Image (tube, grey):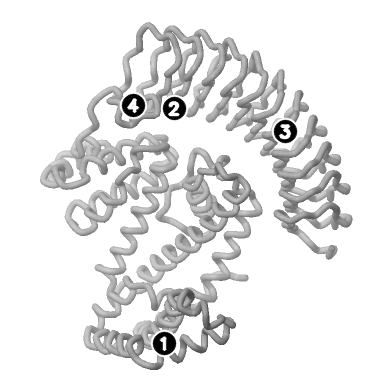
């Protein structure tokens, strides 16, 4: 291996051995191979992924390691963990005892093992999943913990819950009572225990599951409750909020009366009630002080759609079904709404005076489309390995939120709850970032000229030119030149005559896209040059 190598990904092969690693290596992914033993790990390693190998032990872990993923192997124990470790994923093994956990650890998944006792949990821990083990007690929970999943253990009691906790699933244990619930709790699942009573429920609780308990009575259900016993139609605590009620929460008192008056006339429109439910969940999801900037974006969007029926119809449709699943679906739906809004902005409001803003919007849509394609391929890869993998939305949203800042995706939601379920590694995220940057540098101009909202902008600037351009495109598609170019593609890709009918649709789309680029490219550059803004098409990223 080269001495300068920093990242090595040889996953999904049938490798049984490796040469020595160079000291320069920082990221290593050898998952889903046939390794039974490993060479010494390099001293600079930060990320190590060895999931899906028949390993019985790991080599000594370097002091620089930050992320360790060793799921679905044959491990019965782990080596001492370095003090730098932040994330540990060791689920689906045969581990009985965990080593001492470092003070820097934020994420721990040790589910589906034989763990009988948990070590002391560090104060830094945010996410804990120790489901499907043999735990009878839990250690004191850290004050920073936000997510805890302890399904299918032998727990009789839970320790005091920290005020930071947002998600708790303690189903399938032997619990006879629950401790006081923190005010921040959004989701509580306690199915199949021995509970006769539930504690007071937090005012902001959104999801509650308690089936399979001998409950004599229920506490007062909060108005925020959306999902009861995994059934969004179970009635919850109250009737769904009307659109007027959902809108008022987003505006300060000084604006509220005016906005309610403006929204009153559209409250009965089709899908308005669904959009209301979406807004209500979005408000609960991003209610903390650190999301003030994001809430301002939502408010601006609401102000804009109240006077625009076409935009309103598009966003109301995006909200459909979003209120029937988890909070990450709400975040992903918001991102879909912002894409719809960006498309609408370029299509309906783009002109010669705002070209930089329109190109910036187009670049963001391009990046999101690229991330969607990458996520789709990752999902297909995971489903080939795990037939039951169904966390599609976590993969989609995971790439968007993880790359929000580095790819300047200013319109998408700032974060998500369940990134850990996406099975995305740091290497996956870095690879996706690089793929998007390279694609944008090399393909953006062609994509832009094929993007219908941009074509509508060009039409608005010069309707006569646009009419001639479309005539030229239709003449090409219906004339001999199209078939000639298609035949060239068949020869280039060595497509046998017997399957050309099956492939003509795919290759035909490529031929039309290339011709569209030829037709629209000159006009795009002409308009940008007239405004001295040709640089808007130059590569944005350093490869």
Residue 536 visible? The answer is no
Local packing at callout 1 (Cα closer than 10 Å; few below 14, some 14-19, many 20+) is some
- The residue where tag 4 is placed is 225
What's the residue at 36%, 68% (across, down)?
357
Q: In front: mark 3 or mark 2?
A: 3
200 relative to 397, above or below: above
Q: CA distance from mark 3 to mark 2?
A: 28 Å
Residue 347 visible? The answer is yes
Judge by depth and name the residue closer to the eye, 514 or 140.
Answer: 514
116 relative to 537, above or below: above
Q: Earlier in the sequence, mark 2 or mark 1?
A: 2
Q: Which mark is residue 187?
A: 2
Q: CA distance from mark 2 to mark 1?
A: 53 Å
Does residue 172 appear left or right of residue 57 in this picture? left
Q: Secondary structure at mark 2?
A: strand
- The residue where tag 3 is placed is 93
Q: In front: mark 4 or mark 3?
A: 3
Q: CA distance from mark 2 to mark 4?
A: 9 Å
Q: Earlier in the sequence, mark 2 or mark 4?
A: 2
Q: CA distance from mark 3 to mark 1?
A: 56 Å
- The residue where tag 1 is placed is 518
Query: In the image, residue 165 lies at what x, y percent?
Result: 51, 26
Q: Secondary structure at mark 4?
A: loop
Query: In the image, residue 102 lies at what x, y percent?
Result: 73, 31
Marks 2,4: beta carbons within 8 A: no
Marks 4,3: beta carbons within 8 A: no
Q: Earlier in the sequence, mark 3 or mark 2?
A: 3
């Amino acid at each position: 291996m080269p001495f300068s190598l920093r990242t090595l990904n040889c996953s999904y092969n049938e490798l049984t051995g490796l040469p020595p690693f160079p000291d320069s290596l920082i990221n290593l992914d050898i998952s889903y191979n046939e390794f039974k033993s490993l060479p010494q790990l390099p001293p600079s390693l930060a990320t190590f992924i060895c999931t899906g190998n028949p390993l019985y032990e790991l080599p000594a872990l370097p002091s620089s390691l930050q992320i360790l993923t060793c799921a679905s192997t044959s491990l019965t124990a782990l080596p001492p963990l370095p003090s730098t470790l932040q994330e540990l994923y060791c689920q689906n093994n045969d581990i009985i005892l965990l080593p001492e956990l470092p003070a820097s650890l934020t994420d721990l998944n040790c589910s589906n093992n034989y763990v009988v006792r948990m070590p002391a949990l560090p104060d830094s821990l945010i996410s804990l999943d120790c489901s499907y083990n043999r735990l009878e007690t839990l250690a004191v929970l850290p004050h920073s913990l936000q997510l805890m999943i302890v399904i299918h253990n032998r727990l009789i009691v839970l320790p005091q819950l920290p005020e930071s906790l947002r998600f708790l699933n303690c189903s399938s244990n032997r619990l006879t009572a629950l401790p006081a619930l923190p005010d921040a709790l959004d989701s509580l699942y306690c199915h199949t225990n021995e509970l006769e009573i539930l504690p007071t429920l937090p005012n902001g609780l959104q999801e509650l599951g308690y089936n399979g308990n001998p409950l004599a009575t229920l506490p007062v259900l909060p108005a925020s409750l959306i999902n009861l016993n995994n059934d969004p139609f179970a009635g919850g605590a109250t009737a769904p909020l009307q659109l007027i009620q959902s809108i008022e929460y987003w505006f300060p008192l000084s604006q509220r009366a005016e906005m309610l008056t403006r929204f009153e006339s559209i409250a009965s429109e089709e899908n308005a009630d669904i959009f209301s439910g979406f807004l209500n969940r979005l408000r609960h999801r991003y209610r903390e002080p650190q999301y003030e900037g994001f809430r301002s974006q939502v408010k601006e969007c609401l102000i804009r759609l109240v006077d625009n029926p076409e935009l309103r119809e598009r966003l109301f449709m995006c909200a459909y079904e979003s209120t029937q699943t988890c909070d990450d679906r709400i975040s992903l739906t918001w991102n879909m709404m912002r894409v719809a809004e960006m498309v609408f902005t370029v299509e309906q409001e783009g002109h010669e005076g705002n070209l930089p803003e329109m190109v910036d919007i187009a670049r963001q849509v391009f990046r999101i489309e690229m991330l969607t394609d990458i996520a789709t391929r990752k999902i297909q890869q995971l489903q080939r390995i795990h037939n039951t993998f169904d966390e599609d939305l976590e993969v989609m949203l995971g790439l968007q939120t993880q790359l929000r800042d580095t790819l300047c995706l200013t319109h998408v939601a700032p974060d998500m709850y369940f990134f850990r379920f996406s099975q995305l590694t740091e290497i996956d995220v870095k690879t996706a970032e690089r793929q998007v940057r390279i694609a944008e540098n090399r393909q953006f101009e062609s994509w832009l000229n094929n993007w219908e909202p941009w074509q509508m902008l060009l039409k608005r600037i010069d309707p006569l030119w646009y009419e001639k351009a479309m005539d030229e495109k239709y003449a090409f598609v219906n004339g001999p030149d199209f078939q000639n170019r298609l035949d060239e593609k068949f020869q280039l890709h060595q497509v046998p005559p017997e399957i050309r009918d099956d492939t003509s649709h795919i290759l035909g789309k490529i031929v039309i896209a290339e011709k569209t680029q030829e037709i629209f490219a000159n006009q795009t550059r002409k308009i940008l040059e007239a405004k001295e803004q040709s640089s808007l098409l130059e590569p944005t990223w350093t490869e």
